[in-house]
Image (cartoon, helix red, strand yellow):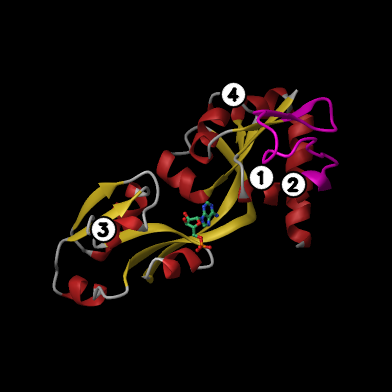
Amino acid sequence: MITLALSKGRIFDETLPLLAAAGIEVLEDPEKSRKLILPTNQPDVRVVLVRATDVPTYVQYGGADLGVTGKDTLIEHGAQGLYQPLDLQIAKCRVSVAVRNDFDYQQAVRQGARLRVATKYTSIARDFFATKGVHVDMIKLYGSMELAPLTGLADAIVDLVSTGNTLKANHLVEVERIMDISSHLVVNQAALKLKQAPLKRIIDVFAQAIQQD
Ligand code: AMP
């Protein structure tokens, strides 16, 4: 049995065409089903639905043989013991700094002010501001980061941005692009040895499918 860990939403949706290239079709729609283990048309391949931040953990400890997860998650939560053969070039977005549109970020940075930064991505944010030489007070949040500058909780947020519509709708502006993000294939090292042929086939088909795009 080959177990693939995916998270619902963009990663799931954008992995489907890659699976199709490998002849794998997921038989249930995660938006309609409450099942956490989804069968596929291949009796020996199944998909498990986990939170995006749990994908590396499932794969690392063998709860899944392989998984798809964002580079942001791999950086924040670590990728110890994971084989990362492919950048799948899906679920693309960026990690950016955003502030209220009436906040003068450049001025605050120039003046050497201490910035209060709210984010789920504390590691990425800390590294970024340290490299820039900006002193920050980091406030860890788990969601709805856009709310932090609007309520006075923080001066700035570090969050994923795709179209920029969420920022715009909340009167926020992107002031720095920290890094581009896409999703990667991660594989359990032991599984790669024990189930070499089927896993290598999936990796090879995914690699080919990406190149054709
Ligand atoms: P957008 O309005 O298109 O800029 O999307 C921004 C919102 O979607 C933010 O709340 C992000 O956290 C989330 N988001 C954007 N891209 C991704 C992605 N690739 N993976 C997970 N969340 C994302």
Report the disc number at residue 62: 4
**Quadrant assignment, res 176:** bottom left
- The answer to the question of whether label 4 and label 1 lie on touching residues, with beta carbons closer than 8 A, is no
Q: Quadrant of the N terminus?
A: top right
Residue 139 shows up from this direction: yes
Tell me which segment is drawn in magenta. 18-46
Which element carries disc 1, helix, strand or loop?
helix
Q: Is mark 2 within 8 Å of ligand 1?
A: no
Residue 50 x %, y % = 57, 33
Is disc 1's CB within 8 Å of ligand 1?
no
Instruction: Residue at 47%, 63% (x, y): give it.
Output: 166
Per the image, the residue denoted by label 3 is 151
Q: Which residue is mark 1?
A: 12
Q: Determine whether label 1 and label 2 are within 8 Å by CB.
A: yes
Badge 1 amino acid? Phe
Position of the C terminus by quadrant: bottom right
For badge 3, the amino acid type reads: Thr
Q: Position of residue 108 (x, y in %)?
A: 19, 72
- Picture quadrant of residue 64: top right
Task: Name the spot of residue 121 as percent of width and height, x first.
Answer: 37, 49
1 or 3: tag closer to the N-terminus = 1
**Amino acid type shown at disc 2:** Leu
Instruction: Find residue 16 and name its label.
Output: 2
